[in-house]
Amino acid sequence: MQVSRWLVESCPEILEQKIISAVAYREMKGSISDMELCQIFGETVWKSGDNYHTHAVSIYVDENEKRCLVTPRLSVA
C-alpha cells in the first residue's frame, strides 16, 4: 500500500486506516508523538529504536527508503 511518499508493506486490512492516518499526520506535522500514536491506534504504542509496537503488531520504519513493514507480534501464551 502506498501512503503519500511511504510504502507500507504487509499491513493487515484492519490497520490500514490507522497507518494511513499516522503517516498523513507525520507528513503534515513533521513528527508524531507516542501519545498521538496511542490516540490514532486506540491502544498503547511504544517505540524501540526506529520501530513502533502495539500488543498486536510491530511496525519497522526505514526513514531513508520511506517504507514501513507491519508484522504480527508473537503470542506469549
Image (cartoon, helix red, strand yellow):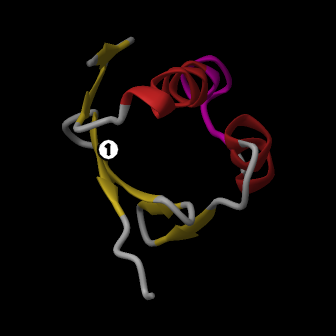
At 72% from the left and 35% from the top, the residue drawn is 40
At 41% from the left and 62% from the top, the residue drawn is 50
Q: Is residue 14 left or right of residue 66?
A: right
- Location of residue 27 with respect to 66 vertically, above or below: above
Q: Range of the magenta residues?
A: 25-32
Name which quarter of the figure residue 65 lies in: top left
Counting from the top left corner in percent of width and height, residue 72 is at: 34, 58
Q: Residue furthest front?
A: 77
At 75% from the left and 44% from the top, the residue drawn is 42
Residue at numbered disc 1: 63
Counting from the top left corner in percent of width and height, residue 54 is at: 56, 61
Magenta span: helix, strand or loop, mainly?
A: helix
Name which quarter of the figure residue 60 lies in: bottom left
Disc 1 marks a residue whose amino acid type is Glu
- Location of residue 51 with respect to 23 vertically, above or below: below
Nearest the camera: 50 or 55?
A: 55
Q: Residue furthest bottom?
A: 77
Based on the picture, tell me whether residue 63 belongs to the magenta stretch. Answer: no
